[in-house]
Image (cartoon, rainbow, N blue to C red):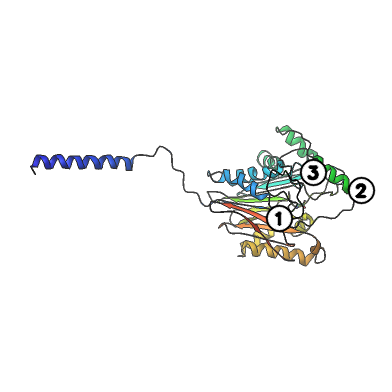
Amino acid sequence: MSSRRKFLKASVITGAAAVTGSKIFALPKKIIKPELNNPIVISTWDFGKPANAAAWEVLKNGGKALNAVEAGVRIPEKGHSNQSVGYGGLPDRDGFVTLDACIMDHQYNCGSVMCLENIMHPISVARMVMEKTPHVILTGQGALEFALANGFKKENLLTEESKKDWQEWLKTSHYQPEVNVENKKAISKNDPMPGGIKNHDTIGMLAIDSLGNLSGACTTSGLAYKMHGRVGDSPVIGAGLYVDNEIGAATATGVGEEVIRIVGSHLIVELMRQGLSPEDACKAGVQRIIKISPEKSKNIQVGFLAINKKGEFGAYCLQKGFTYAVKNDKEETMYTAKSFY
Ligand code: GLY
């Protein structure tokens, strides 16, 4: 081969490599996001599944855990098919739907509303209390006035179905907190949400985002036919929900009075700090309730759900039938918690 031909061949090869090289090293058009740090969201009961799906939309795009838990629990708040959270919740003994909710982020910021009426999304009011006021808790009329002043609409939350159930209850007015168990009854054949069975109450949701930060939210209409003005554990920071970004987070469901007595969610986070797994910490919380109220504990439900900083999760409850939902990039799963009884 002449030296000129060798030169031409080499030029062609070099040129091809350069073209290939320019493709390989060309800057991508889209900015590559940092790798997700295994976000995860977990929440109580069957309605946790559609709630998690909404939270996941935030988490999978690198959104904040705080935004995820708010978006997540708004789903059952507006869903009329459950009678224990938000719109359609069963009223108190006087026929008022009163809502309790709280939210907590990874920096110990927290907000709560108690006994709030006529507002579809108490969780968003709780977040506004956290972000726009120097306070943690607003209650009743004050919480309502704050919500209305901040753009929330007044709405009737008592559905025909819940009104009918309440009127039926009035015939005896026998007050007995319900033990939520598996497959209790279908609420409605046309239920638009999975989880249309009466085996749920409060939604507690815990999430870790792509930065590894934790947040939690908890919202409920509380115990059906409670005394007017009664507040349960759900909006009580430390009882219905607690988040410690160094350790993990916990939330509670069931009869709130028993959870408040032991400041349940805070207890569980502290037990995780001492090295217990999320499930063992939840179990220890349930055992504490049994120790304090051995007889009562046989006829009520309390369930705890927890997650640690590594993303390990677990739950435990008094009575069989407490389910919880988990969503991350690998699974979308319903679990049934182990129970003491
Ligand atoms: N855990 C809900 C309530 O006791 O109101």
| Helix, strand or loop for disc 3 | strand
Q: Residue 171's mark?
A: 2
Q: Which residue is rendered at x = 40% and y = 37% of the image?
A: 29
Q: Which residue bears the numbered disc 1?
A: 252
- Position of residue 322 measured from the top left corner of the image (x, y, whole percent): 71, 58
Label count reads 3
| Above or below, 341 relative to 202 | below
Q: Which residue bears the numbered disc 3?
A: 98
Any part of residue 228 in sight? no
In this orientation, which residue lies closer to the viewer: 266 or 312?
A: 312
Hey, which quadrant is residue 81 in on the image?
A: top right
Please rate how many residues cluster around mark 3, counting C-alpha atoms within 10 Å: few if below 14, some from 14 to 19, many from 20.
many
Asked if the beta carbon under badge 3 is closer than 8 A to the nearest atom of ligand 1, the reply is no
| Helix, strand or loop for disc 2 | loop
Question: Farthest residue toward the front?
Answer: 189
Hey, which quadrant is residue 129 in on the image?
A: top right
Location of the C terminus (image quadrant)? bottom right
Asked if the beta carbon under badge 1 is closer than 8 A to the nearest atom of ligand 1, the reply is yes
Q: Are marks 1 and 2 in contact (CB under 8 Å)?
A: no
Amino acid on which the number 2 mark rests in the picture: Lys
Q: State the separation of the CA atoms marked 1 and 2.
A: 31 Å
Amino acid on which the number 1 mark rests in the picture: Ala
- Position of residue 94 measured from the top left corner of the image (x, y, whole percent): 87, 44
